Structure formats: C-alpha cells, structure tokens
Image (tube, helix red, strand yellow):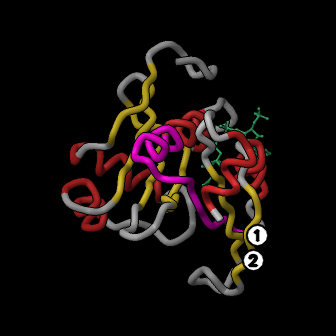
C-alpha cells in the first residue's frame, strides 16, 4: 500500500482489542462520539463495519459504516485520522477501502453527513466524487448544520447511463 506513511501500513477490520485506540482517535474530533459500549456492540453484533488504518501496529485512522435493512446505500458514520498523520492519504485510502467493501456487498453507494464548516472533509469527499444531496439544518447536537453527500458506485458494465437507470 502506498500513500506516504511508510511501508509498515495496512487497512483491516477493527477488533475488540482496538477499542482503546478507537476511543482515543474519536476524542480528537469534537462531534457525536461512539462510546466504549457502542464500539463493543458494533464490533460484535452491530449492522456495521469499522476499518482501521494501522501504522507500525498503531491505529492512526478509522472509518465506520452502517448498513440498513431495505437500503441500497451504506452510511459513513465516522471517519477520523490521527492529527499527526493527516495530509498523507490515510483518509482517502480508508474511504476507498470502505467503498470497495460496499461494492462487494452489492450495495449501490454511500451517503454521509459533514459539518458545513468542515473544509478538509468536504475537500476529501469532493475529491472522491461525492455529490451534495441537501443541507440538513440543526443536524448536530450543538445545532450546527450538516451537508448530506452521496456517491453512487458504478458497475463498469453499466456505464453512466446504466447507473442512472439502476439507482433512480
Ligand atoms: C478530514 C480528515 C479525515 C482527512 O484525513 P487525511 O488523512 O488528512 O486526508 P487525506 O490525506 O487522505 O486527504 C485526501 C484529500 O482530501 C483533501 N483534504 C484533506 N485534508 C485537507 C485539508 N486540511 N484542506 C484541504 N483539503 C484537504 C485533499 O483533496 C486531499 O487530497 P490531496 O492531498 O491529494 O490534495 C481529517 O482531517 C480528520 O480526521 N479530521 C477530523 C475528523 C473529521 O473531520 N472527519 C470527517 C467527518 S465527516
């Protein structure tokens, strides 16, 4: 794997033993957080998936996906990269791995919410091809607005027109 963070890196599914690292990571981002109990539920029997990016065995980033029955879209619930490891492609690689997982599960795409003032995350998602669905007023606990973004994953054999027909 490349991305400028050295050779001893990798993306894998999170495990129970990662919970202390995951709690520490989430604490770096001031928004709705997963508690220890939430993480335990997610990693044992929740309808979700957490991927971690490790650098020399240390967890430096994570992405959490939720899957809903009767929905063809996965929801990106959380994405965080350790402050000292930002700007090196960690989030991009985590999101690409998440997208590959969603595609493999036969789902049609992903949706997520991002704070209106989160310039870095919005730039990341734009670069990855996410589109604005709508603004959600007062979405966060502190009253801040969110932007809802989505990305459709296109099976190559369908092409752009085929995708539109498949998801609308
Ligand atoms: C947003 C966040 C996940 C980005 O992680 P990262 O590993 O630094 O991002 P990457 O290095 O993979 O950047 C990929 C692309 O995103 C964009 N990007 C990332 N950080 C950016 C910044 N600070 N300013 C502008 N663009 C940025 C760039 O387009 C970048 O591509 P480039 O380097 O080729 O130009 C990270 O800043 C973070 O953890 N922030 C706090 C938590 C958060 O906001 N999560 C998102 C919640 S919706």
Q: Neighbour class for label 2 at 10 Å: few (<14), some, many (≥20)?
A: some
Residue at mark 2:
135
Give x and y (percent) for residue 163. Answer: 66, 50
Going by the image, does 85 lie left or right of 49?
right
Q: Secondary structure at mark 1?
A: loop
Give x and y (percent) for residue 64. Answer: 44, 54
Give x and y (percent) for residue 30. Answer: 57, 66
Q: Secondary structure at mark 2?
A: strand
Going by the image, does 41 lie left or right of 168?
left
Give x and y (percent) for residue 32. Answer: 50, 72
Q: Please tell me which residue is depicted at 56% across the width and 83% down the height of the picture.
A: 141
Q: Nearer the viewer, residue 6 or 159?
A: 159
Asked whether disc 1 touches disc 2, contact meaning CB atoms under 8 Å apart, the reply is: yes
Question: Which mark is on residue 116?
Answer: 1
Q: Nearer the viewer, residue 69 or 6?
A: 69
What span is in magenta? Answer: 98-116
Q: Please tell me which residue is depicted at 55% across the width and 44% down the height of the picture.
A: 81
Quadrant field for ligand 1? top right
Question: Which mark is on residue 142?
Answer: none
Q: Please tell me which residue is depicted at 57% across the width and 22% down the height of the picture.
A: 5
């Amino acid at each position: 794997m490349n991305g400028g963070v050295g050779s001893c890196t990798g993306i894998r599914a999170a495990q129970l033993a990662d919970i202390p690292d995951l709690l520490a990571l989430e604490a770096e981002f001031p928004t709705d957080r997963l508690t220890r109990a939430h993480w335990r539920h997610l990693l044992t029997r929740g309808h979700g998936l957490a991927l971690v990016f490790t650098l020399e065995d240390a967890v430096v980033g994570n992405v959490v996906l939720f899957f809903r029955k009767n929905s063809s879209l996965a929801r990106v619930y959380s994405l965080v990269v350790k402050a000292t490891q930002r700007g090196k492609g960690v989030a991009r690689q985590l999101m690409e791995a998440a997208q590959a997982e969603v595609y493999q599960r036969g789902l049609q795409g992903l949706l997520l919410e991002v704070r209106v003032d989160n310039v870095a995350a919005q730039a990341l998602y734009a670069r990855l091809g996410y589109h604005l669905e709508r603004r959600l007023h007062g979405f966060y606990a502190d009253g801040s607005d969110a932007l809802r973004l989505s990305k459709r994953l296109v099976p190559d054999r369908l092409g752009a027109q085929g995708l539109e027909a498949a998801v609308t």
